[in-house]
Image (cartoon, rainbow, N blue to C red):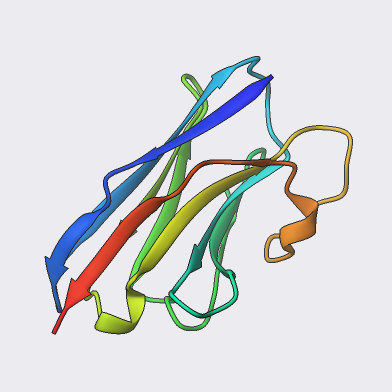
Amino acid sequence: QVQLVESGGGLVQAGGSLTLSCAASGRTFNYVGMGWFRQAPGKEREFVAAISWSSGRPYYADSVKDRFTVSRVNAPNMMYLQMRSLKPEDTAVYYCAARTPGGAWTAGRQRDYDTWGQGTQVSVSS
């Protein structure tokens, strides 16, 4: 059983920075990919960024490209999301997700992820 735990959320002013962390515990192995999604109040959950575990290739939503950086460390299994130049519209609950081996994975497709964290709140004030 894999558990994902996010940390690093908080309140920041517009233009500021935050770094989110996602720690995987329990049974560990090389994931196919891991990703970050977010859900703002009253909106659908949306893709933010993802990373291929084997190659380290990152993927980004257009709305965060050039502002956010996703990275991962293999041992221990950790994923990070460095967020810069934050905007009020970045306010949301941010979720970490993982695709364990044995299934297809497309970075931005939510249904391809089989393990999810509980989320961490990011609030950006104007």
Q: Position of residue 50 (x, y in %)?
A: 57, 56
Tell me which residue sits at (60%, 46%) in the image.
97
Q: Residue furthest front?
A: 42
Quadrant (top left, top right, bottom left, bottom right) of the C terminus: bottom left
* Residue 35 visible somewhere in the drawing: yes
Tell me which residue sits at (68%, 27%) in the image.
30
Tell me which residue sits at (38%, 68%) in the image.
92
* Residue 55 visible somewhere in the drawing: no
Q: How many marks?
A: 0
Q: Which of the pair 96/85 is nearer the observer? A: 96
Q: Position of residue 60 (x, y in %)?
A: 53, 69
Q: Is residue 66 above or below residue 73?
A: below
Q: Position of residue 80 (x, y in %)?
A: 39, 45
Q: Position of residue 15 (x, y in %)?
A: 14, 77
Q: Residue furthest top?
A: 27
Left or right: residue 84 compared with residue 20 = left
Q: Is residue 104 above or below residue 14?
A: above
Please tell me in which quadrant of the rendered image residue 37 appears.
bottom right
Q: Which of the pair 115/85 is nearer the observer? A: 115
Please tell me in which quadrant of the rendered image residue 109 appears.
bottom right
Q: Is residue 92 above or below residue 114?
A: below
Tell me which residue sits at (46%, 20%) in the image.
76
Please tell me in which quadrant of the rendered image residue 6 appears.
top left
